[in-house]
Amino acid sequence: MSTDTPAETEPEVIVRRAGRLGHLILNRPKALNSLTHGMVQTVRDTLEQWREDDAVATVLISGAGEKGLCAGGDVVSLYRAAVDGRPEVGDAFFADEYAMNALIADYPKPYVAFMDGIVLGGGVGISAHGNQRIVTERTRLGMPETGIGFFPDVGGAWLLSRAPSGFGHHMGLTSTHVTGADALALGFADHYVESSQLEQLATALETTGAEEAIAAVAATGAAVPESPLMQQRDWIESAYAQDTAEGIVATLQAHGDPAATEAASAILAKSPTSVKITLELIRRAAQMSTVHEVLAQDATVGHHLLRGHDMREGIRAQLVDKDRNPQWDPSTLEGVPADSVFSAFDPVTSGSRN
C-alpha cells in the first residue's frame, strides 16, 4: 500500500469506452492499485454517468500491472492525517468509498470484476459487490484489516457473515488470503476463468452481452478447482462456533491440526481490539437485511477506530516504519473490555465528529 503514484501524464484510473463496454482500469501498479480518494471519486462519478448512458451495456473493472486488481485503500494517507489531528480526512474518504460500494451493489447493468491476482480490503469492496465477479488461478483474496488495527470494512462483513461454516469469521479474524476457488465456494465470486483468457473476455464484452461472453470462457463442473479451505471445514466450523474470541483461539490451539494452530497464532498477532470488534461486526451483519445497513455500520465503527490507538499503531508498524512490531493497547484479548467493543458501534453524534 505504497503512496507511489503514476507519472503526471498517467491517470490513477483509466476510463475507456469500446463498443458497448465501459472499462475502468485502476492504474497505480507500483502501489498494487491501492485506492486514493481521487480514484474512489472517479470510479463513483463514472459509474453514475454510465448508469444513465444507454450506449454502455456492460461495465468492467480491472487493475493495471501483473500483480492484482487492488490491494485496498491508501491507508497511509489516512494515518498521516490522523497523526496530524485530522481524522475527519478518513471519515470523508470512507464516506465516498462506501457510497461507491453501495452503488456497485445496486448497479443495474452487468458489473464485471476481474478479481485477478491480489484482491484485498478495498479491492474486495470494489469488486465483490458486483454481479459478475470473476476469479482466476492467480486470485489471492483477503480482508487483512485486523493486522492494521482496523476491521473488515467496505461492506465486507455482508459477505463474511454469509459465508458457510464459520469461514467468514476465519477470514476476518486471521486476515488469511484465500484462492479463487475458495472465493467461489465462499460466495465472493461467481465465475472461474483462466487468467490467460481475460484479455479475450474483455474484448468480447465490447460487442457481446456479459452472460454470453463470460459463459464462453468460464470453467464449469470438474474444470473448476476444488476449494482448499473447504478441506479444513472440520476445525474451522467447530472453532468459530465459539462465543468469544478467547474461546475461538483456545479451540484452535486444542484441535491438533497444524493449520488450526497457525490460525490461532495469526489471531493472537492481530490487534486484540480489532479482533473482538470484527467478531461482533460480523455477527451483527448476519442479522442485517441489506449491504447498505452493513456499510452504515462500517461508517460508525470506522469513525471510532480512526480516533483510537491501534489503527495508527498498526499502519505505522506494517506500512510506515515497517518494523512489523505493533504495540497493541490492550495487548491481549483478555485485556479488551467489553465496553470498548460495544462503544465502537455507538452512533456518531454531531458533537463526536471531531
Image (tube, grey):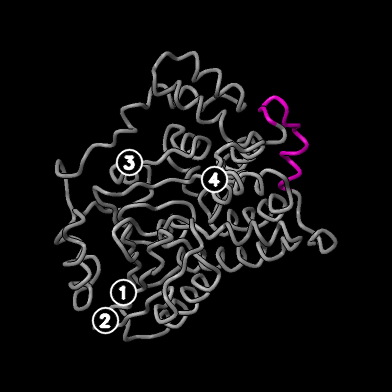
Dot 4 amino acid type: Lys
Is label 2 in contact with label 4 (beta carbons under 8 Å)? no
Disc number for residue 182: 3
Query: Residue 47 location, x and y as percent?
Result: 44, 76
Residue drawn at 74 percent across, 33 percent down: 338
Viewer-closest of 247 and 66: 66
Q: Which sits earlier in the primary sequence, circle 3 or circle 1?
A: 1
Dot 3 amino acid type: Asp
Query: Residue 310 location, x and y as percent?
Result: 67, 43
Dot 2 amino acid type: Arg
In the rendered structure, the answer to whether residue 195 lies left or right of residue 264 reads: left
Disc number for residue 58: 1
Q: Nearer the viewer, mark 4 or mark 3?
A: 4
Alpha carbon distance from label 1 to label 2? 7 Å
In the rendered structure, the answer to whether residue 277 lies left or right of residue 105 reads: right
Residue on which the image places disc 4 = 322
Alpha carbon distance from label 1 to label 4? 41 Å
Is label 4 in contact with label 3 (beta carbons under 8 Å)? no
Residue drawn at 62 percent across, 37 percent down: 271
Residue drawn at 56 percent across, 63 percent down: 98
Q: Which residues are magenta?
A: 331-345
Q: Which sits earlier in the primary sequence, circle 2 or circle 3?
A: 2
Is label 1 in contact with label 2 (beta carbons under 8 Å)? yes
Query: Do we see residue 212 in this rendering?
Result: no
The residue carrying pointer 4 sits among few (fewer than 14), some (14 to 19) or many (20 or more) residues within 10 Å by Cα, namely: few
